[in-house]
Amino acid sequence: MAQDKLSKDLGEQGLLKLIQAYCATDIVGDDGAILNLKPSYQLVVTTDVLVDQVHFSDRTTSAVDVGWRAATANLSDLAAMGADPIGITVGLSLPGTTPTSWVEDLYRGLSRCLQQFDTPIVGGDLTRSEVITVAITALGQVQSKQIIARSQAQPGDAILITGYHGNSRAGLELLLNPELKTNLSDRERDVLIKAHQRPQARLDVVNKLRSIDPEARVAGMDSSDGLGDAIVQICNLSKVSADIHLDKISRSPSLQKLTTHYPVSEWIFNGGEDFELVLTLEPQLAHKLLTTLTPDAAIIGQIRATKPEVPQIRIFDQQQIIKLEESKLFQGFQHFLG
C-alpha cells in the first residue's frame, strides 16, 4: 500500500487542485462566486467553525463524518431560518502534517451531505495552521414572509420539536467509552452513534410547513446547542415565557434503555447536536404540521405571556412544577465557560 502523502508535500496549489474536484466547477475559479437569487427572495448567511479537539476528534469522528457534520450544522441553521440552501464556502486551516487522504475524506463527507439538498461548494480558502479548523459559510434564500426568527413567538403558540433529542449525546458517550456495558443491541448502539456522526438537517420540515401555510408566522431555531438552550433563546428574544411538559417529549427506544445508568433527561435538554428544529406556531398549524412528521416529533408545551417582562420557563413533571433554579435541564453548551 502506497504511503499517504502529507499536506505539506502537495503544497497549496496541489491541495487546491485536490479540493476543487469537490466544488462546483462552473462557479469556482475566480476571486469570488457569483450566485443568483430568485426574485423577491432575501439572502441568508450563516457561519460555523469546527475546531479539532473541541468539536471533533479522531476518537469519535472520521474525516468523512467531520465533513458531514460540518455541512449539517450549517444547513441546519438555514433550515432554522426557513431558507433554501444556495451553496457553501469552506475555509480550511491545516497543519502541514495532515495526511492528504484526511483532506479528501473531509470533502467526501461534505459532498455526500450536500448532495441530498443539491447544494454546491462554491468557494473557500486554504491556509496552514497549528490545528485543523473547518470554517463553513452557508448561503440561503428565503421570502420575507417565510422567515423563521427567534423573536416571533407569541402567547398561545404551541412549542413543537421535530424529532428526538439526546441521541447525539448518547452516541458520543458510546464512542468515548466503547467498553461500557449497556443493555443495547448492536443495532440500537448504531442508531445512537449514527445520530452523532451523521446528523440530518431538517430542511424537509421547512418544505412541509410551506405546503401547509406558506405565510405562517413561525418562531424557532435549531437545537444544535441543546433543546433547553433553544427554548431559552426563543423566550428571551420574543419576550415571552414557556411551559414545558416532560412527559410530552418523545425519547428514542435506544435512549430509553439507558435511563438507569445515565442522566438521559439532561442529555435531552443539554446534550446538543441533535440538529432538530424547535418551533413555536399557532396550535392548529402545529397539529397539522405534526401529522406530516415522523412519530418522534411532538408538541411539548406552549408559550405564555410574561409578567413581569422577564421570561420564565416552567417545567411540568406529571403536573408538578420543577423549580428551574433546582433543575439541570436548562444548561445548554456555551463556549468560553469553565
Image (cartoon, rainbow, N blue to C red):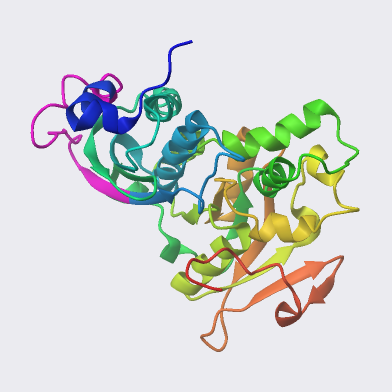
**Relative depth, front residue between 271 and 236:** 271
Choose between 243 and 181: the one closer to the eye.
Answer: 181
Q: In the figure, 270 relative to 177: above or below?
A: below
Image quadrant in which you'd find residue 100: top left
Image point 82% across, 38% down: which residue? 253
Q: Does the magenta run of residues contain 266?
A: no
Q: Which residue is drawn at 55% across and 55% down?
A: 282
Q: Nearer the viewer, residue 103 or 280?
A: 103
295 relative position to 198: left or right:
right
- What residue do we see at 73% from left, 61% from top? 266
Q: Magenta stretch containing residue 41, yes or no?
A: yes
Name the outermost residue toward the top. 1
Residue 19 lies in quadrant: top left
Closer to the camera, 337 or 246?
A: 337
Q: At which x and y percent is residue 301?
A: 68, 61
Asked if one can make out residue 325 in the rendered structure from this viewpoint, the answer is: yes
Residue 154 visible from this viewpoint: no
- Image height of 331 relative to 33, above or below: below
Quadrant that contains the C terminus: bottom right
Magenta highlight: main SS:
loop
Q: Residue furthest bottom?
A: 308
Q: Please state the extent of the stretch shown in magenta in the rendering.
A: 19-46
Q: Provide residue 155's location: percent of width, then percent of height.
A: 55, 69
**Position in image of residue 74 (x %, y %):** 40, 44
